[in-house]
Amino acid sequence: MREEEYEQAYVSCRLCPRECGVNRALTRGFCGCGTTIKIARAALHFWEEPCLSANGGSGAVFFSGCTLGCVFCQNREISRDGFGKEITVNRLAEIFRELEAQGAQNIDLITATQFLPQIRAALLLGKEQRTIPVVYNCGGYEKQETLRELEGLVDIYLPDLKYASPLMAGRYSKANDYPEKALPAIKEMIRQCPRPEYDSTGAMKKGVLIRHLVMPSGREDSIRVLHLLKEELPAGSFRLSILRQFTPTPACKDYPEINRRLTSFEYDRVIEEALSLGFTDAYMQEKSSAKEEYIPPFDLSGV
């Protein structure tokens, strides 16, 4: 397919649960994107969970735009402000090969849904030669129908499950329907990748790894998230990562209840609940993880 033909995929865009229905060749929907792939960085990234980055780093490709509007987003420069460089499908496929040649443990597609038609094409171009897993790293706000387009192309799904509360989802991410969309999306991911698989070094080769960020003033909702995971998903079908790296952004000044660091009491209470529910192999973070230096520079490296 020629580059201009991808415009047809965006004539009435409904890739994400917002279903804006706009013609992205003429205007922008919530994600802020047009019809051409835009990325801000493609480089080895060493700050994913150990099973994804301890053996050489993830081959992280950071896509511009986002289907969520999180006020605490650390990547706002690319998620909302649109920084990045437009590239072709062929160039994206080349980037995947370059990252693998650099020793990447996997190809880590970060916030990619808004460009899924071209990403799918780029993944197909190198599928037979690729020897490392493909990771779909997303905020969890996905449509099952869209995810089905990735079946057989994605080896590891890395979604967030941010909220159980629609009120919190609306207030902090502009998506009141987040809880009702994210859980079915994660079930679709598990259908495609039903059980985590690892190699002899402990590197994940296939499966679903669910992240949850504990927020200031949000520990009760975090506990509800844990209970949803326990009650709604099959035992052993995913691995859990409980994050404590919340760092307030300038936008948080308008949300005083989250305009601070997470306390040890808040995080520890959530961890205690996770252990009591049987999530004994969950990833847990040290307090030092809440540092801005873990945010990579968006400098068009590797683009």
Image (tube, grey):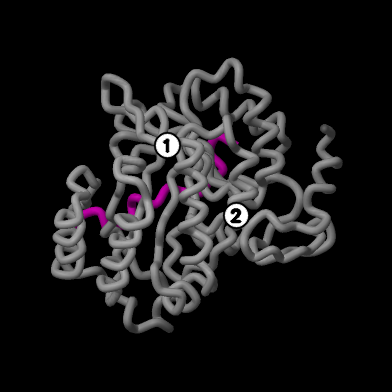
Q: Nearer the viewer, residue 148 or 78?
A: 148
Kind of residue sitting beneath label 2: Lys
Is residue 85 something that shows in the picture? Answer: no
Q: Is residue 17 left or right of residue 2?
A: left
Q: Which mark is residue 212?
A: none
What residue does disc 1 label? 194
Q: Nearer the viewer, residue 252 or 270?
A: 270
Assess disc 2: are there few (<14), some (14-19) or many (≥20) residues with their C-alpha within 10 Å of its C-alpha.
many
Give the prevailing secondary structure in the magenta stretch.
Answer: loop
Kind of residue sitting beneath label 1: Pro
- Quarter of image, res 16: bottom right
Q: Is residue 63 above or below residue 45?
A: below
The residue furthest top is 129
Give the label, 1 or 2, closer to the camera.
1
What residue does disc 2 label? 143
- Quarter of image, res 249: bottom left
Q: Nearer the viewer, residue 253 or 29?
A: 29
Q: Residue at x 49, y 41 (%)?
A: 191
The x, y position of residue 261, in whole percent, is 26, 70
Q: Is residue 142 left or right of residue 91?
A: left
Q: Is residue 21 left or right of residue 46?
A: right
Q: Residue at x 85, y 41 (%)?
A: 5
Q: Check if residue 244 falls in the magenta segment.
A: no
Sequence-wise, the earlier of marks 1 and 2 is 2
Q: Is residue 109 above or below residue 101?
A: below
| Image: magenta residue range | 287-303
Locate the C terminus by quadrant.
top right
The x, y position of residue 234, in whole percent, is 35, 46
The kind of secondary structure element at disc 1 is: loop
